[in-house]
Image (cartoon, coloured by chain):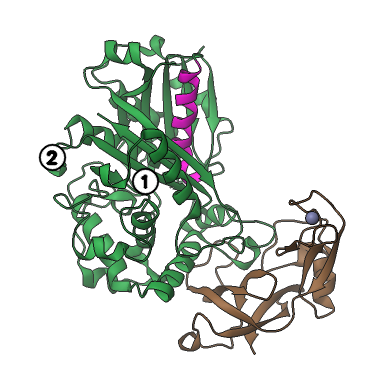
Amino acid sequence: MSFENFGIVSFTAETKASDFVSYLEKGQVMATRCRKCGTNYFPPRMDCSKCLSSDVEWFEIKGEGKLVTYTVVNYGPTGFENDAPYTLAIVDFDKVRVFGRLSKGIKEGDIKPGMKLKVLPVRLPGDRIGYEFQRV
Amino acid sequence: MQDVAIVGVGQSVFSRKCGVSIRELCFEAYTEAMEGLDITNNGIDASIICSAPEYDKQRSPAGSISEYLKLTPKPSFYVETVCSSSSTGLRVGWSLIKAGLHKVVAVIGFQKMSDLTSRDAAERMSRGGDIIWESPFGISMPAGYAMYARAHMAKYGTTEEQLAKVRVKNSHYGAANPKATYRKELSLEEILGSEVIASPLKKFDCCANADGASCIIIASRDIAKRITNIPIWIIGLGAATDTMTMSGRESLTGLRCAQEAAKQAYKMAGVGPKDIDVAEVHDCFTIAELMAYEDLGFAKPGEGVGLIEDKETYVGGKIPVNVDGGLLSKGHPIGATGGSQIRTIVKQLRGEAGETQVKGAEIGLVHNIGGVGQYGNVTILRR
Ligand SMILES: [Zn+2]
């Protein structure tokens, strides 16, 4: 798969961070860290804006994160019309803050800011790939 | 360096579907702005055209608009910060005059959104987020602000009913604004009962897409005094940014770009939140108005709800806000919105606001945000 296969609808074919998709295929959701100054990045990026180095390495986002906020979207933009309702969320992990979707397996009434979540790759319809937050 | 004044303000009627072309919409705003001014087209040294791209087919709209308004052969160019484009235009125009390059500048904002279906318009706005990492999940404008709302509720205990009260107020004033898209008063029950768009935001927590144009004419002190009886002075300007990504935001209970822009504008104007007599804030969603109360210092963080509960942001309250109905009533023709907000404050400071006039208003503030808190602009005006 290439980076064009990332997400429900992709708008970008090329990025220096396209290995993100290869890692997803292997079952890992990754972030990057600058080897020179140690800054962590999510979304992953191969250029450090802090020290202007491009010497960065990948690391896996493991363990439990905490739900910061979420919304259940009932009205999707073009390209997402058959996808709603879906839940967008922001989750704080140890080193990075991650934006994504909550697993459809979690009922709306059970969602609470502060709840513990993990992030895992997920296969999407039409030979696509992404990631989602799931219950610990 | 001469002071800069706003000498003319105008806007078209904002509507769901205007039925005319963009240049004709701009003509409507421009003629209102020129009304009563002792100046002709020839006296305008430059025009700045402001909108969000990709809602219509015309590339380089400055060309067609400057031709239609006969502002050629003077310079004309395009400025964009999505929903705050015309506030950014004002900032650029101010600096052109301050620098001595021009003496009179027209800032023209527009958007015609009815050419697109509402889903296609949502798709454009979705691509106003980070297209590599966040748009592929289906982010939208309501979803972005909904995440702020949920975080605000979790931290401060803000309720959906308190959010709805912002719309109750704005619909009350919108009913009196002949240029607003929505002129119907809404009850708390109607708002709370409307369909959920992106939880916890419902249909009536959200502003609507609209067609419209606005025009602000600014001039250096010597010219301003000559061509108008009531110049309104630009005394404070603030502008700031925050990350395009939602995951990059340090705070999800207030807009950092607005807090920073407000700090700059207050400092430049030499005034504080207590000195503001009337304000226009960017209420694209009800939560956005509540956060604006806090980001502008009208209330402490988490205490903005007190202002709406106690009706302090109504005319007669401590700090009347959006007494023209706000974006929630007027509709939000993206590039025209900032100019419309400025027009309202200018009319208030001139004492021309009719039944919603805040008595004796001398200092007014405009808070205009681009995207989901990406671009913050605060402008302070004085009579
Ligand atoms: Zn670095």
Kindly identify which residue carries mark 1: B17
Taking depth in this image into account, of B17 and B290 the one nearest to the observer is: B290
Of helix, strand and loop, which one carries label 1? Answer: loop
Q: Nearer the viewer, mark 1 or mark 2?
A: 2
Tell me where residue B131 appears, x and y as whole percent.
Answer: 66, 56
Task: Please give the label number shown on residue B359.
Answer: 2
Is residue A90 or residue B299 the one in the foreground?
A: B299
Quarter holding the C terminus of chain A is bottom right
Q: How crowded is mark 1: few (under 14 residues within 10 Å), some or many (20 or more)?
A: some
| Residue B197, above or below B130 | below
**Chain with brown colouring:** A
Q: Is residue B367 above or below residue B237?
A: below
Location of residue B202 by image quarter? bottom left
Magenta residues? Answer: B82-99
Q: Is residue A52 left or right of residue B162?
A: right
Chain letter behind tag 1: B
Residue at image coords 55%, 68%: A81
Q: Is mark 2 on a helix, strand or loop?
A: loop
Amino acid at dot 1: Lys
Q: Mark 2 lies on which chain?
A: B
Q: Measured from the top left, where is residue B183 in percent x and y? A: 22, 52
Chain with colour green in the figure: B
